[in-house]
Image (cartoon, rainbow, N blue to C red):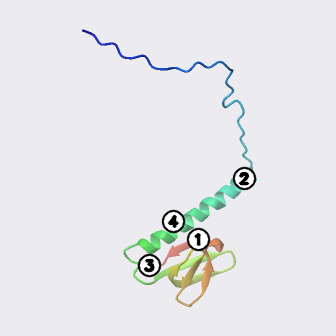
Amino acid sequence: MAKQLPKLFQNKINKDLKNNNKIYYSANKDQNNIDDLKDNKIDINQKLNNIFTSSNYIYKANVTIKTKDNSYDTKIIGKNRNFIITIDNKTIPISDIIDIEIKK
């Protein structure tokens, strides 16, 4: 009493398939530098999120911020989409930040 399973429908292919015949790969040193900068921006956002979500952050965090032009030893109290707000009432663009470290 062996049951036979129904046959599966297979559509017949009547033409030549040319899937994935052309592959474009572009890697040069300039592109890698741009990718490194993008990765750095992601790291900055991750660092900021880690600062604001840490259990030590209540209202302000002592940090050292290195930007393209300056270095700040300040306390950050908040951030919005594009800027960090310090306790000195300064706004620092997130796009200008190279590195941010928590002071202990």
Q: Quadrant of residue 14?
A: top right
The amino acid marked with disc number 4 is: Gln
Which residue: 59% across, 78% down?
83
Which residue: 27% across, 10% down?
2
Which residue: 36% across, 16% down?
5
**Mark number for residue 46?**
4
Is residue 65 shown above or below 40?
A: below
Q: Earlier in the sequence, mark 3 or mark 4?
A: 4
Secondary structure under tag 4 reads: helix
The amino acid marked with disc number 2 is: Gln
Q: CA distance from mark 3 to mark 2?
A: 37 Å
Q: Earlier in the sequence, mark 4 or mark 1?
A: 4
Q: CA distance from mark 4 to mark 1?
A: 11 Å
Which residue: 64% across, 71% down?
95
The front one of 26 and 74 is 26
**Mark number for residue 104?**
3
The amino acid marked with disc number 3 is: Lys
